[in-house]
Structure formats: C-alpha cells, structure tokens
Amino acid sequence: MPTTSLPRGVAIIGAGMSKFGAFPEKNSRDLFVEAYKDLLASVEKGFDPRQIESFYLGNFSSDLFEHQAHMAPLLADAVGLTPIPAARVENACASGATALRQGVMAIASGMADAVLVGGAEKMTNLPTADVTDTLAAAADMAFEISAGFTFPGFYAAIATAYMAKYGMKPEHLMNVALKNHENGALNPNAQFGVTIQKWMEGRVAAALKKGKPAPTWQTVMDFLHDDSANPMVAWPLRLFDCSPITDGASALLLVPADRAKDYTDTPIYITGSGQASDSALHDRADLTALPAAQRAAAQAYQMAGVTARDIRIAEVHDCFTIAEVVATEDLGFFAPGEGYRAAEDGVTARDGAKPINTSGGLKSKGHPVGASGVAQAVEVFKQMRGQAGARQVSGDVPLALTHNVGATGSTCLVHIYERKD
Amino acid sequence: MTPDQPSRPFTAASFNQYLAEGKLMASRCEGCGAVHLPPRAICPACHSANLQWQEESDSATLAAFTVIYVAPSAQIALGYGREKPYLSGIVQTPGGQKISARIEGFDPLQPESIHVGAPLQRVSDSPALTYRAVTEA
C-alpha cells in the first residue's frame, strides 16, 4: 500500500485524562466527563465546544464490563455535544488508537474541522475471573480460548518462544516493570504510581505494624522472585509483569493543522498513522514479533518521512513486560533479540537514549483498555510541550511515537507526532 | 472421506465434530496446495474457496507454552487455578502448521524443565485439542 502524507494536516490542540485507578463510585460517563474537562482546560487560548463536529470513542467492552452498550452518544450527551455524530469503535485493546485514526481521517479528508477523540473503560466492577473472560473475548474463542488460554497466557507463550530463540531470562522482564514503575511514580494520574522499591518497603512496614515477622527481601529482585509477593499469573509472567485492571478515560481534540495556532502556540501535529491486522497468534510464522506492528510502523514512518532513529520518545503497548520488549523491536528501535536488554541497560529509562513509556506505561499508569491508546497520545502531547511535570524528559521532543496493540497483535496502530516551532 | 460424500462445511463446528471422532482435520487448498490449521473456508494465500479436508498427523512439537495460574471461569469450573495450574501452548505439526492446544504430561510446577521443541503426541480421545509430552522409553 503506498503511503503518502495526509491530504490535510492534522493537529492536536488539547489533551486530557481522568485519573486511572479503581473507582467504585464512578462509571465510564463520570470518568469521560473528567477527561473532557481536563482536555478543554488544556487548550490555552480557549475552545468553544460548539465547534466540535464529530466524536469517535474507543471502548472495548462496556457491554460486558458495565452492561451498557451504545456508549458514544451517551458520552457525547454527557458533555453536551449531541446532536453531533458520535460513534464507538471497538478493536480490543487498540480501540483507543483506532478511534484516533478515525479522527485523523475525518480531519485529513476535510469531512470535519474539529473532532473529539475519546477512550473509556470501566473494568473494576467485575471479579478477576470475569475480567479474564471478558478480555479473552478479544481472542479467537473457537480456536484459541478453547485451549485454555488467557491474555497473560498468550503473552507468556510469546515470552517462552522469545526466551528459547534469544536466551532471555524472566529476570530481564522484571527490569521493564521496575523502569515503568519508576516513571509511573512521577505521574499523578497513574493507578499504581509507586516504585517497586517503595512498594516492597510498604509491605515490610505493614508486616511489622501487624506484629508479623518482617519479610527478608534484601533487594527488589528478591521481592520480585518471591511467589507470595509477586505471584505467578501465567509462567513466566508474574503479577508485576502484567498491567492492572483499571477504570479510566482520556480525550484529544483535533483540528486542521492550518487552524491549530488559533487555539494554542504549541500544537502537536500528527504526521504519520499506520494500522494493520493479523491472524491469531498460532498462525504466525514467528511467535516473537507482531507483524501487524511492523507493518503499521512502516506505514507511519513512511507517511511522516522519518525513521525509528529519529523518534525521541515513545509510548508503547506494555500490557505485559514482554510486550514492551517485542514492541521496541517491531518499531525498529532495537534489532530482533536485543530489546530485552534495553531496560536493564537503562537505554529505555527516562534519561536514556530512547525513553519508553515515560507515563509509566500500561503497567504502572493502568490499562483501562479502550482509553489506553488515547492516553498514550495524551502523554506524548504533554512531553512534547514540556508539560509532563516531574517526569518531563530533558531536552526538546520534536518527534514522538505511540504504539497500540489489540489482542496479541491482530490489530496494531502506530502514530507519529511532530512539534514544529 | 470418500469423494462421493458431500464435504462437511469448513466451520469450527465441523472441526470439533472431527475431533470428537478422534481426527485432527485441516483444510487443504485445491488451488495452491496450502494447508490451514485451524481449517479455513477461504485460502488466505490464493483466495480460492476450493478446499478439501485433510487429516493431520498426531505428532507435533511444542512451539510455545505457558503455565496458567489465574484461570478463566471455564477452567476454574474444572478445578484449575492457583492451586492447580495447567499448561496451554502452541504446537507445530510435521507439516509446519501451528495451532493452540491444551498440553499435558509435563510438571506444571517445573516450567524450567519444559522446552520449546519438545516432542508431543495428540490425545486422540479428548474433546478439546490436547497434546501429551512424549517421554523417551
């Protein structure tokens, strides 16, 4: 497929999100209203919501999580935007970036001059087994789930294939979790915004307070190897290899590039968008890469006229620690089989050569499925404008990338963002 | 299957029906010869819909696996979970096709001793696609 630049430039002029976490008193609507208000407050020169012409919502399964379907008009109404067209798009955990791509196409084609893109998911109403079942519906029920697979199980299987091919050990994956919690600890919107070191110290303090014998962990690696502290979910993946179950919402406001400066002095331009689909995991020749991610990345790089080397920071889909390793290889940041060393070597740390998941990623920030792809764009919007607070990377961020995956890569999207000033 | 019988439709239901009869069946494209496991109704290689069923070997190798501790409700109902973890995996047939399956015959508590590439044999009387480790005599 020839991929040329967008027929009309697209800019993000505002971005917002709710806090991510477990909120028994809030539903998707409440969370989306928070994200929308945060978004409007982020547009420095102000924006009249009556200018918004269209709304695309990423949401995976409000039907099963909340017994509420037809979410897009409900949320449009909640923020006073009816009667504009509103549509929900579902692409499993890639629903958010798919909604963003619909928004990009609406602006680029000239169909609309202001588009609201949202993402929302309310997951914590259900017990864990029901959440596991709901997420499993994103896989092939007839030929994958019938084998007893769960989502942690699929990514664990990818990890075993990767370990066999490249010699990675489970300890390497722990470094990804440690790094993402270091970042998330500096993100006030993160669900688990605490380092694993602090988490461990909290567990020791709690044990002592209860008069129980203090755990004997000397290091975070002792803690992460302890089956009681970090229980196995799907070998070789433990609890701290997995993103959590999360409630949250996120929102972006898109306008044509040539009007962006009416609303802000520092718009962020979307210059590349790629998307691809793929079969079930077992149908792929190589189980250690996601071909749809490679294809989406190639499209986005070509459209933006940049290469992997040019990207300053990236938010990648770390639903599991192994997923971040594979993502950074699929995106061309590291050669196949070399991505697993990056977190250990500090390359992907906030002050490293290629910072990955400065937000804390899905791992620490949380993973409200449909909201995640949009929240990735919220993070790069803030980083590129120097508004990321304590977790702000040093120096300019002229180019950034987001990578959002549905299931085991049956859907992948990559977007590229530029700051031009 | 003899040629004069109408072919079963290329559906998950037919695949499971064959499994219940003890057979692992793939689809084979009459246009380009590609073999699909799980079976398909349209060949993704050449887009032909001219397919035949083909019985697959019962031997395979382990391409990837996991030991699942946090189980879905269907497995919890069978007694699996934190106290009784189980294996799922992706197996590769001698023809190179891969498919997801239940895996038995390994110790789930010794995952480091389970190796990608290990030989497997299909459990032909299982209603779900299941392979068992082949132990050297």
Image: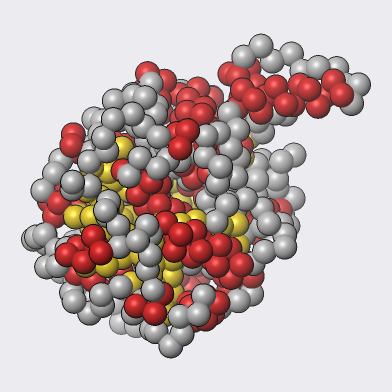
**Is residue A392 or residue A74 the one in the foreground?**
A392
Looking at the image, residue A268 lies above or below residue A351: below
Q: Indicate left or right for A101 with A108 as reference.
A: right
Instruction: Report how many numbered discs are placed on residues in the image.
Output: 0
The residue nearer to you, when weighing A201 against B81, is A201
In this view, the residue farthest toward the front is: A45
Residue B85 falls in image quadrant: top right
For residue A7, above or below residue A206: below
Q: Quadrant of the N terminus of chain B?
A: bottom left
Q: Residue at x 21, y 66 (%)?
A: A259
Q: Is residue B83 left or right of residue A277?
A: right
Q: Can I make out residue A143 in this image? A: no
Can you give x and y, in whole percent of width and height, for residue A10 in the image?
22, 63
Percent coordinates x, y for residue A94 in the rendering: 40, 58
Colouring style: secondary structure
Location of residue A78 in the rendering, given as x and y in whole percent from the top left corner: 55, 77
Q: Is residue A346 left or right of residue A70?
A: left
Residue B24 position (above or below residue A387)? below
Say which residue appears at 54% left-offset and 66% top-offset. A32
Q: Residue at x 81, y 27 (%)?
A: A206
Give residue A13's position: percent from left, percent from top: 32, 59
The residue shown at (70%, 45%) is B81
- From this view, report whether residue A195 is shown above or below residue B48: above
| Residue lying at the far bottom of the rendered structure | A83
Q: Quadrant of residue A92?
A: bottom left
> Looking at this view, is A219 or A401 the one in front?
A401
